Every structure is written in C-alpha cells, then in structure tokens.
Image: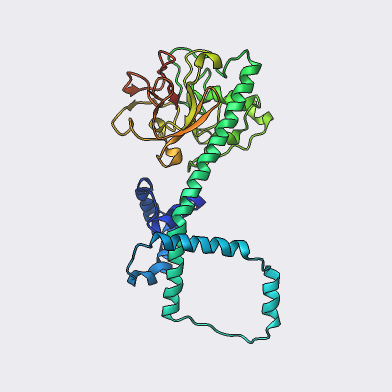
Amino acid sequence: MPKLSDFEKELIFDYCLGLESSENHDEVKSLIENNDEALELYDAIKKSLSPLDSLTAQECPEYIVERAIDRLCKAANSSHIKLQELLGDEQSQHVGKVHFRPNLSQVVTAAAVIFFVATVFFPVLKSARQNSWKQKCQWQLSQIAGGLSNYSADHDNRLPSVATANGQPWWKVGCNEQGNCSNTRNTWLLVKEGYVIPANFVCPGVRDGKVLQFDALQAKQYNDFPARKYITYSSKILAKRDTIISLGRNPFFSDSNPLFENLPQNNHKTLKLRLNKKLLTINSINHNRKGQNVLFVDGSVEYTKNRNIGPNKDDIFTLQNTDVYNGYEIPVSEADSFLAP
C-alpha cells in the first residue's frame, strides 16, 4: 500500500477539523476507509481533539479574532530571545527531575487553545496556500508565454506545431506510435528545444502532477511528455501552423480541461465522451474547481471562474456544436478556442 503524500495528510487534517472542501469530502472519506495509514492518522488526530467534545462551540467575535492575530504578530516581531540563551538559562538552574502530570482541566485548556488557533488560522493558512499555488501557476504560465514568444521569434513567427493529418488523435499523451497522436507533442517542442523547463508544465495546485527530471539531452530523445501527469495544462488545438499574430488575443494555455481528466490509460483504447450538464459547468481540477488560470496569445495571464472567455466569449473547454468527443475533432474556425486534452 503506497505511503500517504503530504497533500493527502493535509486533506485528512482539514477533514478532522471540518475544513475540507465539499469537493474533497468524499475523497478523504474513501481514503480513510481504504488506507491503514490514513485511518491511523485520522484516529490519532481525533483522539488528540477528543477533550473538546464536551465544549459548546460558539462563534468567535471578529474583534477578538483581529485582536488575537494582531497580538500574535506583534509578539513574533518583538521576540529577540535566542534559543541558545534559553538553553543557557535552563542549564544554569540546577533543578532535579520533576515529573509533571497535567490534570484533565489543563489538558482541556491546552486543547482549547490549540482548537482556537486552528479555527482562526487554518482557514487563513488554507486560503493562503491556495492563493500561493494560484500565483505560482500564473508565474509558470508566464514562463511558458516567454518560451512561446522566443520560439516564435526563431521560427518565422510560427507557434510550435507538429504536422497533423486529418483523423489523428490529440488525446494520447505519451504515445510512442508514429505520427502525431497528441496535442502535447506541440508543447513538448518547447521542452525539446530548450525554451521552457519541464517543471513549468505542472501546476502546483494539482495533486497528481509530477515534475520531470530531464536534462536537455534526455528531452531530445522524446517526442512527447512521457505521461499525462507530467503536463497538467491544456493547450489550443491547432488546425494549422498558426502564428502569434493570426491568433490575436485568443486563449492558448490553461489549467487542465475538466472534460478529459480521466483519459484511457491504454492508448490503444478509444476515447468516447458525451457532454452532460456537469461537464459543461465545472472548472479545472487544478485549483479545487474554483477557477482556472488562462494564458492568452499576447502573453497575459488571467485567473477566471468563467469558462466563456476571450474576444468571442467562447467556452475554452468545448468545441462549438459538438456533444460527443472521440479525440480527433478540431475547431472549424479561429473563433472556436478549444484547449485540450
């Protein structure tokens, strides 16, 4: 059984404190039921918080929260005592061994303090963590924009594009077949030719992403990302070798398309996906369904909760007038901004 990742441990901790998102609730519950390490961690956290079960929860007034945060910040900023000094003071006191046994009231008091700090700061820290991931994701997309610009300047203003024949698939990431069989082969040219490092293609907010540890020489031996987990962004399906100028300010990259999160693991299988109400409304999984970062051809990056963006207010995750996807469809016009897989 695989060990828990740091992300999974954070989810379990949030779950014990009731801070998990609605999207993660079922996932954490299933993890605890099916993973011994997760169950052990869950039991340990719940046991440490059990003295609080007898307390009546009350909403903390905002002015108290603000005062507590202010005092903690001031205390942190004004503390200049070095650890060595503390240790020196401790060693200078020739005190025999003292066995301290806290009573129940002390345990409850300590637990109450921990719970207060957790309820005040954990939502703030969780939000800060999400914002940090979102900002780093935007920075990575800006690095990709720089790579696209440099590539274009070196290739007669053209964007990275592998020759594609009609009917070839765009969803088989990591496929070793001859010919172009994935849209990510276009993006891989940026890695293969040294314009963007592999790490910038994995959004920090996605759970299953993994950064490639490739050097330039290794990258040249591949024609595509080895697997989907090494690229957690979706890019525009190009019908031809477009130029930056011809695409104007159209969306070109984004957090992963929510329609194609569960692609067939075996590239010899076929893709069959039919749109439904949920697929038409959900946002990318990269940022807990709250929204997605989008890179435009002009190099700008925006975070949006709306999928209908760009000059044509087009849904960037679907093709116009298409309800069923087999993995080889392409836009019929530049007005249709389709980012996949």
Residue 167, position in %: x, y?
43, 15
- Is residue 131 positioned above or below 16 on the image? above
- Looking at the picture, the colour scheme in use is rainbow
Residue 90, position in %: x, y?
67, 78
Quadrant holding the C terminus:
top left
Along the line of sight, the residue nearer the viewer: 313 or 279: 313
**Image quadrant assignment for residue 17:** bottom left
- From this viewpoint, which residue is outermost toward the left? 277
Residue 206, position in %: x, y?
48, 41
**Image quadrant assignment for residue 275:** top left
Number of numbered callouts drawn: 0
- Is residue 269 positioned above or below 1 on the image? above
Q: Residue at x 51, y 36 (%)?
A: 229
Asked if residue 222 can be seen in this view, the reply is no
- Is residue 120 positioned above or below 283 on the image? below
Residue 71, position in %: x, y?
52, 64
Q: Residue at x 58, y 85 (%)?
A: 98
Asked if residue 306 can be seen in this view, the reply is yes
Q: Is residue 306 left or right of residue 234?
A: left
Along the line of sight, the residue nearer the viewer: 178 or 103: 103
Q: Residue at x 48, y 12 (%)?
A: 165
Along the line of sight, the residue nearer the viewer: 169 or 231: 231
